[in-house]
Amino acid sequence: MIMDALRKRMKTIIYVIVVAFVATGALVYLRGPRGGNSQQEAYAQRSDRPVATVNGEEISYQEYSYQLNGYLRQYQNQISSNQVVGLKSRVLNNLINQELILQAAEKNGINPEISEETIQEQLDQAINKYASSKEEFEKIIKKNGQTIEDVKNTIKNSMTMQKRIEGMLAKVKADVKITEEEIAKEYEEVTASHILIKTDDKDDKEAKEKAEKVLKLAKAGNDFTELAKEYSEGPSASRGGELGSFGHGKMVPAFEKAAFAMKVGEVSDLVKTEFGYHIIKVTDKKVASGEEFNSKKEEIRKKLLSQKESEAINQWIEETRDDSKVIIKDKEINAFTAAQEGDLKTAIKDYKAAIKANSGSYYLYHNLADAYQRNGNQEDVISTYQEAINKYPEQVDFYMSLANIYQKEEKFDKAVEVYEQGLTNNQDNAELHLGLGDLYRAQDKTDEAVVEYEKFSKLSGDNLMAHYRLARVYSQMGLEDKSKAEMEKLKEIQKKKQEQVKEEREEENKAEETKTEAKTEKN
């Protein structure tokens, strides 16, 4: 069952992700110690134990933490605390898939040799990118306890791993082919309208009789658009039955088969589907022939080939994983997997254990509350957020989540109390003022809302999106003067940022000129 849940989450182009992981490892020597900020360390706690094993081969917490922190650095401030465990699961499962591919490559004798010339080429590229000379580069890596030979070994290992992965995946997708029929089907389209007589609110006989009556009118040459507006029971009735253009695989099989078999201008006989009886009129067709089709065939072939190759790789990884012994030893990820699987009792138990085991895992309270919510334990949801607030008063997300729960229950006084508690502990937090303003606005307390919105504006500083959001809110409230004032702030910030960008570019150009001059003098 756990494997089924993992399959659903791994429907991605795994090949791209895996190779990206390997490629980023090639410049490890320039990144310094694998530390991170306190938030990253809380997200990826250190451990001497493996985070998972794949057929007995260990995936270390060190490698897992390194990959995770790479994502956190890349998407800094874009990942909310309730998304952390999902990201951790994705990172670990990608590492597991990478290990499965490497093991398969070894079994298949895929062990490429990386030439000294290739390694030197990669080293030269790194030197040119990160330093003005080899000597400067050596100074940089020396600070991290590295030598040129260490760097060359890292490059060799990373490139060997990448080539082994690429070789194995090439073997997996070698038999993927695209037929002329598949290309034609991808190109073809039908533009059609229909009249639907539903069967879910009447018996089949009654629906069919009504449909036959309308069909006679359509076959007799009556305006199809007007008939659809008058008789159709589908959502497209107001548009005269227009469905627009669609390709193969977009409609239910019986409807698609009938539509693609028709000529332009033709009205179908009754077509029965799970929705009821349809009368179809084809108004245009794009057929797989002619100059336009021939000019796009290669583009379509490449697109379909890429899709089928990705599907082949995903299927191979799923099958390989089914045949392998994969053990995940991280309580957080096991809890997340159980929740995805729908085993909420296990998820709740494992989330609690993970919270107890790691004092820095404040983000897990969101996942625990979500599991309780899905399990119908509303009181436990509230108590979970209350516990989280008491334990981590600086985490504003908890106040906002709890206040939103009370607001949905129309317990506005309690929601206000939660925001006020949050502002007592985090008085300069703009988002809490915005949330409280929205709460007052929902109660039609305009004056109180404006007070909070003005505090939000002041605390938001040069945040463009914050002022734009507030301008829209004021406009929706009919406070156009305040909306215009926020837009003026936005323009001033944009002007300031443009000037900063210009100055930065000038500094970069000067630095590049200095670097070029230094290299010229050296030569």
Image (spheres, grey):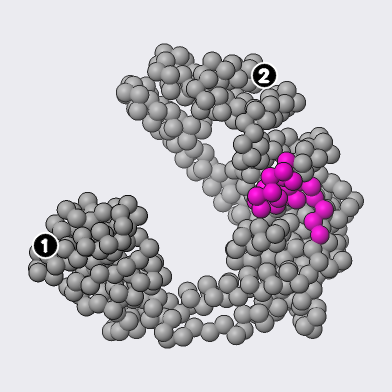
Residue 322 appears in the rendering: yes
Side of 203 relative to 25 (left or right): left
Seen at 60% across and 20% down, the residue is 418
Task: Identify which residue, 382 or 15, lies in the foreground.
Answer: 382
Within the image, what quadrant is residue 174 found in?
Answer: bottom right
Placement of the N terminus among the 4 image quadrants: bottom right
Magenta region? 327-348
User: Distance between the Cα atoms at labels 1 and 2?
Assistant: 68 Å
User: In the depicted view, which residue is nearer to us: 296 or 85?
Assistant: 85
Q: Which residue is mark 2?
A: 425
Q: Is residue 241 visible?
A: no
User: Residue 118, percent across and down?
Assistant: 73, 76
Is the residue 435 above or below the residue 3 in the image? above
Provide the residue designation for mark 1: 223
Q: Position of residue 155 (x, y in %)?
A: 77, 68
Quadrant location, the C terminus: bottom right
The crowd level at tag 1 (other Cα within 10 Å; few <14, some 14-19, many 20+) is: few
Q: Mark 1 vs mark 2: which is more N-terminal?
A: 1
Residue at coordinates 68% horizontally, 65% vertically from top-left? Answer: 18
Q: Residue 268: image x %, image y %? A: 22, 72
Q: Quadrant of residue 146?
A: bottom right
